[in-house]
Image (cartoon, rainbow, N blue to C red):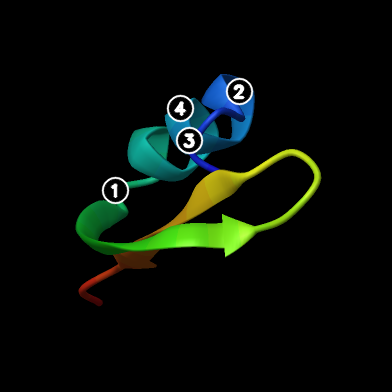
């Protein structure tokens, strides 16, 4: 969920990069999904 700032920060701190979003992916409440990638 894009509104889960703690999770987004955690992923970014481990080197994940945002590569896209899925609009309104989640319901109740409506929220976007963030797609991350990690190069190894």
| Residue 2 x, y percent position in the rendering | 48, 38
Location of residue 17 with respect to 5 vertically, above or below: below
C-beta proximity under 8 Å, tags 4 and 2: yes
Tag 1 secondary structure: loop
Q: CA distance from mark 1 to mark 2?
A: 15 Å
Location of residue 9 with respect to 29 vertically, above or below: above
Tag 3 secondary structure: helix
Q: Quadrant of the C terminus?
A: bottom left
* Number of other residues with Cα within 10 Å of mark 2, as a class: few under 14, some 14 to 19, many 20 or more: few
Q: CA distance from mark 3 to mark 2?
A: 6 Å
C-beta proximity under 8 Å, tags 4 and 3: yes
C-beta proximity under 8 Å, tags 1 and 3: no
C-beta proximity under 8 Å, tags 3 and 2: yes
Q: Which residue is mark 1?
A: 15
Residue 26 figure quarter: bottom right
Q: Is 27 left, or right, of 5 in this rendering?
A: right
40 or 30, which is in the foreground?
30
Q: Which mark is residue 8?
A: 3
Query: N-terminal of the two: label 1 or label 2?
Result: 2
Q: CA distance from mark 1 to mark 3?
A: 11 Å
Q: Which residue is mark 2?
A: 6
Query: N-terminal of the two: label 4 or label 1?
Result: 4
C-beta proximity under 8 Å, tags 4 and 1: no
Q: CA distance from mark 4 to mark 1?
A: 10 Å
Residue 25 figure quarter: bottom right
Q: CA distance from mark 4 to mark 3?
A: 4 Å
Q: Which residue is mark 4?
A: 9
């Amino acid at each position: 969920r894009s509104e889960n700032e703690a999770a987004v920060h955690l992923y970014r701190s481990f080197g994940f990069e945002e590569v896209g979003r899925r609009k309104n992916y989640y319901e109740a409440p409506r929220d976007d999904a963030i797609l991350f990638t990690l190069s190894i």
